[in-house]
Image (cartoon, helix red, strand yellow):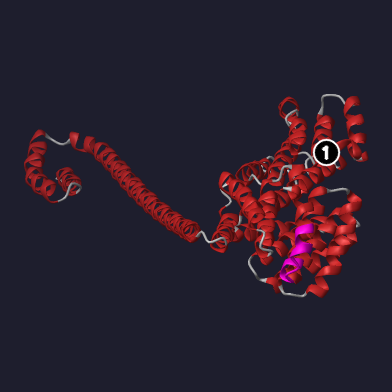
Amino acid sequence: MHKCWYIALLTILISSAAKPQSNPRQDSLLNLLQKTKEDTSRVQLLVDIADVVQNNSPKEARSYLDQIPPLLKKHNYNIGWWRYYNTYGENYRVQGKYDSMLYFMEQALQATQHGLDSIYIGTALFNLGLGYRDKGEYPKAIEYCLQGLSIMERRGLKDREADVNDALCNLYAAMNRNDVAANYGKKAVALARLTGKQPLIARCLVNLARAYESRNDHAIAMPLLEEAYTLSVALKDPRLIATTLSNMADASLVRHDYAATIGFEEKILALWVSIGSQDGQATATRALATCYLQQGKYDLARQYAKRSYIIDTTNKYREELAPLLLIMSDIEYATGNRDKGFDLTKECSATLEDMVADIVSKNSAELEKKYETEKKQYRISQLEAEQQLHLLELKQKTITNYALIGGAIVLLALLALLTGTSARKGPSSSNASPSSRSKSSSTSRKPFSRGRNRNGLAWLKTSTTASAACSAE
């Protein structure tokens, strides 16, 4: 019981130490806000205040962010929308609300489609990668982060490059590819030092140390963590302090130093409570349950395990829940509750099976989607080919029709010409005697009839010959 009072008291002390008015930058920004007009500069200022506040008080940060949309609609400020969505997504990330975080990060990426510079696109892709990393969807996280990194490197922005390399270090460490993680981490630290930005340096140091700890290189990791802790305390950033202490606690736990681990985790839990981080509290309470179990303090172990269980099930943190259920099962077995221990083991197995089924289902859905997309693309190509063939056939028919029409016109022209020639020659036989005309007529009838049946033009030639013969007589 005294441990609970100690943690409650520590929470109050840290919460008091982390109050917004202790931050000179926040005070300065709030003073500026009172003098700023209702224009785009006020949007920038509100985002800056929220960014400063949200690590200590996410709820207070949202109160500033909620003032922004009316201003953005009034002034049609595209970069403002990007900053608003991006900062709101980060606000939910601090609280461990990953679905809400991803929604706002997606909105930030869509906002870049309205003519924003490529640096905003790269940052939006990178932030989406962080979101999927925090949610445990590592392949998507790597995909987005690498897309963001390619843009950052082209632009030569060292702080952004450090951010992305740090994120990739974190990602590969989570996938147990620690050598790759360390390479990205070293690059991130080097870039961060070039920028001189203390929060960035501290964060990169922590993640590089984590990669070394995963390789059991404790001698390399601990100096990095100590430097990061010194920087985070000077910055008065509770989230950064908690993250640094968590890695130091993990190093103590690996060495089976449970007393030191408990000391770290009690401070960490108080910090996570002060800023309202649900996933942080779940991890810290599980670690405390583990340590008290190892010390044989089963009541305290059960108490913290139950607290962690409520957080995990409420927020659907299945990756956190599965190892917790094993700890809870061990507690029950250790206290002689074998049936309850067995039930918890079954629940753990069911949770893991659900996670595997979800992964298989997602992969199957992605394959089906890819197949349907390729099938649609093939069908589109096929329809386009058919359309081209149809157009070619129409073109050929049009050319044929033009040729036929042209031929008919030529024939009609020739017919008109020959008819005119016959008409001009006809009057020359009018001077002949009636008997001659009669003879001429009788002579010309038979060839006329035969010629018309054989060839439509032959009769003109035959008739002209007969008329000339009559004139000779």
Image coords of residue 429 (percent x, y):
19, 37
Q: Dot 1: within a 10 Å radius of its alpha carbon, few (fewer than 14), some, or many (20 or more) residues? A: many
Residue 212 visible to an observer of this rendering: yes
The residue lying at 55 percent from left, 57 percent from top is 325
Is residue 157 in view from this perspective?
no
Residue name at image x 71 percent, y 29 percent: 69
Magenta stretch? 252-263
- The three-letter code of the residue at mark 1 reads Asp
Q: Is residue 226 above or below residue 435?
A: below
Residue 275 colored magenta? no
| Near-viewer residue (285 or 130) | 285
Question: Magenta region's main secondary structure?
Answer: helix
**Circle 1 — which element?**
helix
For label 1, the residue is 48
Q: Residue at x 35, y 48 (%)?
A: 394
Q: In the picture provided, is 277 more to the left or to the right than 139?
A: right
Please tell me whether residue 254 belongs to the stretch shown in magenta: yes
149 with respect to 412 (left or right): right
Question: Residue 19 location, x and y as percent?
Answer: 85, 38
Quadrant for residue 12, please give it. top right
Quarter-of-image position of residue 254? bottom right
The x, y position of residue 105, in whole percent, is 66, 45
